[in-house]
Image: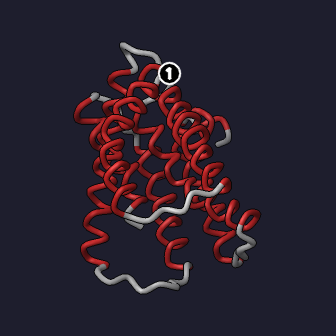
Amino acid sequence: MITSLMPIITAMAAGYFLKEIISKQLIIGSLIAMSAAIWLSLQGSTSISSPNPLLGNFFELLAMACGAGYTITARYLSNKYSALFITAIQVFIGAIFFTPLFIYEYNTIPMNFTFNSFLWTIYLGVVVTLAGYGLYNYALTKIPASKAAVFIYLIPVFTLILAYFVLNEKLSFFEFIACFVIMFGVFVSEVSSSWFKKRK
């Protein structure tokens, strides 16, 4: 539910820092998608008890603020640098930052490296980081940050779809409905207002 706040935070920050125009249509679509994302979250069943949900929610809120800051920064830098350069430099800096932590954990925590875990690590690096953030950064060169952030609402939708096909998890009727409502909210946020006027 807290993750669904990121597009709203991003839209407000984009309006303040980047002087982007935040339309009523974007706000309405975001609220529709956010409501469905909250509904979708409430449908999930908890299998592992959370020891400190208040602290966890607080850190998640900070993570969303950081995510909004990332979007605003990447959108600002896209006026000067290519999406590929922004993605490459963030991966490079990330590698420098995490290498000492990797060495520390490697020497203190027993690790069992398997070929399967190696493949998943490659997937995280190539698909999630390079392709995911690369495409997101490229999108920021074409559309406002406030509109790009709205697609964050699709994360739970794709998560459910992948969970169904990869992990054989079953989707309930209400989860299907929530997914469609999220996509409708994103559609309302992204489609030009002139599209609605033509159909009146």
Tell whether 158 sits left or right of 29. Answer: right
Q: Is residue 178 above or below residue 139?
A: below
Q: Nearer the viewer, residue 190 or 91?
A: 91
Image x and y of residue 40, in percent? 55, 71
Image x and y of residue 38, in percent? 47, 69
Q: Is residue 61 above or below residue 69?
A: below
Q: Tell me what residue is drawn at x 65 percent, y 35 percent.
A: 198
User: Which quadrant would residue 156 be assigned to in this image?
Assistant: bottom right
Q: Nearer the viewer, residue 139 or 12?
A: 139
Q: Secondary structure at mark 1?
A: helix
Q: Tell me what residue is drawn at x 37 percent, y 16 percent.
A: 79
Residue kind at label 1, given as amino acid type: Leu
User: Which quadrant would residue 54 be assigned to in this image?
Assistant: bottom left
Q: Is residue 1 above or below residue 22?
A: below
Tell whether 46 sits left or right of 79. Answer: right
Tell whether 170 sits left or right of 55. Answer: right
Quadrant placement of the C terminus: top right
Q: Tell me what residue is drawn at x 44 percent, y 19 percent.
A: 85
Mark 1, Cα crowd under 10 Å, few <14 / some 14-19 / many 20+, is: some
Image x and y of residue 1, in percent? 42, 67
Q: Is residue 179 above or below residue 155?
A: below
Q: Tell me what residue is drawn at x 61 percent, y 41 percent.
A: 127
Q: Nearer the viewer, residue 97 or 137?
A: 97
Q: Which residue is mark 1?
A: 84
